[in-house]
Amino acid sequence: MSLTRRLVLGAAAGTLAVPYVVRAQAETFRIGALNPITGAGSPYGTGMQRMIQAAVEAINSAGGVNGRRIEVFAEDTQTSPQAAVLAAKKLIEVNRVRAILGTWSSGVSLAVIPLTNEADILLMHTSGAPALSTPPANAKNLGYRYQATNDRFGRAFAEIAVREGFRRPATMAFNNASGIGNTDGFRRAWAAKGNQNGEHVVYEPNQPSYRAELLRVLSTRPDVIVMGSFLPDTTIILREWFQTGTPVKWIIPAWAANPQLVQALGPAVTNGIIAVDSVSNEGAEAFTAYDAAYRRAMNQPGASNVYAAMTWDMANTLALAIEQAKSFETAAINAAIRRVANPPGEAVSAFAAGKAAIAAGRKINYEGASSVLDFDEFGDVTPDFGVFFIENGQFNRRYVVKI
Amino acid sequence: MFGALLVAGIVHGLIIGLAALAVTLVFGIARFPNAAAGDTMTAGAYAGLLAHQASGSLALAGGAAVAASGAVSLLGYLLVFRPLARRPVASLLVAAIGVAFVIRAVLGLIFGHQQQVFQVPLAWPIEFMGLRIPPMDLTLAAVAACALAAAFGVLHLTSIGRQMRAVADDPDLARVSGIRPLRVMVALWLLAGAAAGIAGLMLGVKTVVSPEMGWEGLLTAFAAAILGGIGSPAGAVLAGLLLGIAQEVSTPYVGFTYKIALAFVVMLAVLLVRPRGLLGRVEGVR
């Protein structure tokens, strides 16, 4: 049978004649996966996006939410607020998504959240900037953070500095909300312990050299430098530091001090660096499921991308909240998120089990792959922090810090 | 401290100067702001990276960077800028931005967006008259000096260089005098590409190689080209050095956040006193 114009038109007209109910079943709940595929977040972005898609696939094969399938529209933030705003506008205005999941860096989330607030939809992100907890950014309480705040990271850094016996810490921060959030959190916590803060330098991105910044910090003879930084700038700074021949220790967030940093600089330069990251909820059942999905999609262990575990949890908490709310309205879904994620309740680790429990009228508590995922009044979670020492190019987790 | 900042500023300035040279050559002869110069740099950096990984030699990496950037630059001319010649400047500028996007996207597709680095040996600084200079800075400065000497040699000592300067001076008069424009344009785009390639290689060795690196440095290169006097190769290099040194040496006074702004304040101040730039000429309106 050949496809003629008449046939196509006839078929289209026929579709219109199908009763409303049948067409409504094809309607989907649309969400946006807005992740850092390129730019500074690129080591994590693809995995984050794949895990949203993988979680949604599992949700849809368990019958979807309230009888609707979830449909994912994927976009790239380029780890740049400008590009992210354009992508978010497209997701909201063209694709008409009802939630945006997985913005990574603080600059991007801070730029996108006014748009999601305006459109009255949810934003689930992995950014650290403290400003995302409170008004104006989170004025409508539609923002959920699956990562520790930079302030919490800073507090963890201070715990580590005390434990390691450092006395004269200096701080260096990339000039954005995340970088400065880390060092401010550290300096506050350090001062609160009755200690004296050292030199503090805020530096600009995309510089061919950070020697001036380094010389200023090193001239105060610190015993440790605490960083609020990202991968490219950390690479340049550490390489220049090593060439000055000045001994000093480093405490660096793990999104900057990661295996790629070791690959770039070699084991000699990176030896002894203390890398700090929130740890995934590795003993949990949800993590096992996530890990299997991540290995299938990315051919790497799930533990190599803590942010992908967070986006996996985003899709699951959102779907459970819709199921709990029995509604597709933002206000109802928003009200249900803490109800399905926080205690008390029956601990569940997957959407299908949670859906069954909700249908049976039981209160559930989703225990995630990224953390136990209990949201405070600001929509923030408090994961634990893993303290990794880089030794001969290996990341050895020595201990876990709770704050 | 001042000495160390000066050294860092000179190396930074040489990178800006080479990129500005690529911009100003095109501006002087093809007469439009080539927004693809930054991404031509990036292409050079990746070619250098590949050659360096394969051979471990910085000299070979330099050769590969020059060859690749020259080829990319020439290809841009033959496929895009030549068919658009004598269109308004705005069309050419927009076309150049398009070419820049294409280069960046192709590099991103081939090499991915994760950062890559030159595995150069790290060494402690050399003490010289109380000044601590990293050996890599000396190597890079030498590379830049050779590249600049070669570029100015071509411009001032060869017949094709003379022809290029003649076209820059007055394209119609040059044509009447029997200068073949195609040959000149091919030489121009090769030379501009080569300068960008060396700048990309230097930036890549000092920092990290990523598809966005050149685009992010483009604004400073344009600033240097304008400050030096548009179309003046020597001015572009001088202005690049000035901007690089001003940024680094100013940091003890203005802090690190404002050092980039300071470079542009220097540019504005010079242009207010000397609107044609450092070494530029006053041009009549045709």
Image: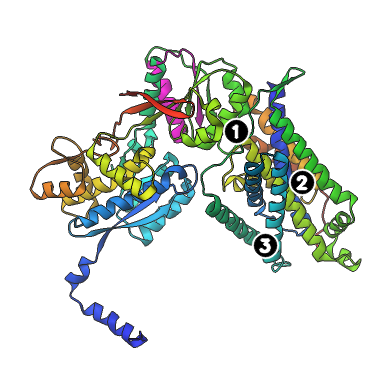
User: Which image quadrant for residue A21?
Assistant: bottom left
Q: Find residue B98 and report its horizontal and vertical position in percent.
A: 60, 60
Q: Going by the image, does A285 lie left or right of A117?
A: left
The residues colored magenta run: A164-192
Q: How many marks?
A: 3
Question: Is the same chain shared between marks 2 and 1?
Answer: yes
- Mark carried by residue B92: 3
The answer to whether residue A219 is seen in the rendering is yes
Q: Which of marks 2 and 1 is nearer the N terminus?
A: 1
Q: Is residue A134 visible?
A: no
**Residue A177 on the magenta span:** yes
Q: Residue at x 8, y 48 (%)?
A: A360
Amino acid type at circle 3 is Leu
Name the residue carrying label 1: B258
Image spot of residue A96 (x, y percent) = 33, 59
The reply to whether the C-beta atoms of the residues labelled 3 and 2 are less than 8 Å apart is no
